[in-house]
Every structure is written in structure tokens, then in C-alpha cells.
Image (cartoon, grey):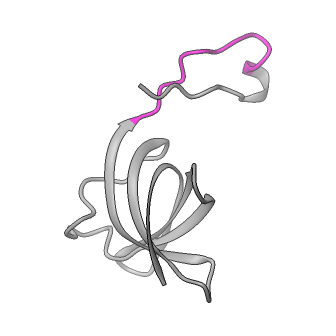
Amino acid sequence: MDFCKTPAITLRRTDYKDSSQIITFYTRDFGKIQALAKGLKRSVKGISGGMDLLTYNQIVFIQRASSSLNILTVLESKKPLEFSTITIESAPFGIFPPVMH
């Protein structure tokens, strides 16, 4: 098990049991990953605030070799992504380049 720290964009949230969620992130270093955020629906030290989609975050997770589901330990929300460049060609396909300030 390795601790990994990387910037990430939140892509998806899925409820898991009573107080946890499985969150899909896109990271620069690890590609698309899934992480289990235990107790995210209640207040947990290290994971503060709500988990919004398409937010730019700094995350720390435990990468497990035996499973594709990682364990999220720290999530620090940076800012929401802004989609400011919409062209006639990209609009019908939903291809909007994100702008990270």
C-alpha cells in the first residue's frame, strides 16, 4: 500500500452504504481512479466540505495493489473548473476545454 498525493478533478460520486461514497477522479499522474471516501456524508477530519462534481482538488489516497478501489484519506478542494471557451464546432459534442486558473 502506497500513499499517493496528486491534483485531481472530480468526475463522479456514487453512494456507498450509509455514510460513504465512491468517487471517480481524473488525475494527471494516475489517470482515472476510483476512491472510497469513508464517512464523507458526515463530518470527517481531512475531508472537509461538500464533494462537488468538476472541482479541482488536491487528494491523498492509499493505492491498493489487490483492488482497483483506492482509499481516499485527504481531499482539499481548490476551485471549480470554468468552461469559458465554447465554439460552434465543440458545442454539439459537449467538448468544452476546462480552464484552470
Disc count in the image? 0
Instruction: Tell me the chief SS of the magenta region.
Output: loop
Q: Which residues are magenta?
A: 80-91
Quadrant of the rendering where the C terminus is positioned: top left
Nearer the observer, 31 or 86? 31
**Left or right of 89 on screen, residue 71:** left
Q: Residue furthest bottom?
A: 66
What residue do we see at 35% from left, 36% from top?
79
What residue do we see at 37% from left, 53% from top?
51
Q: Tell me: residue 7, above or below residue 23.
A: above
Nearer the observer, 17 or 56? 56
Q: Tell me: residue 20, above or below residue 31.
A: below
**Left or right of 92 on screen, residue 83:** left
| Spot occupied by residue 39 in the image (x, y as percentages of width and height) | 31, 75
| Quarter of the rendering containing residue 62 | bottom left
What residue do we see at 57% from left, 77% from top?
69
**Left or right of 85 on screen, residue 3:** left
| Spot occupied by residue 91 in the image (x, y as percentages of width and height) | 72, 19
| Spot occupied by residue 41 in the image (x, y as percentages of width and height) | 31, 67
Q: Residue furthest top?
A: 88
| Spot occupied by residue 23 in the image (x, y as percentages of width and height) | 50, 63
What residue do we see at 19% from left, 69% from top?
45
**Left or right of 53 on screen, residue 24:** right
> Is residue 3 located in the magenta-colored stretch of the structure?
no
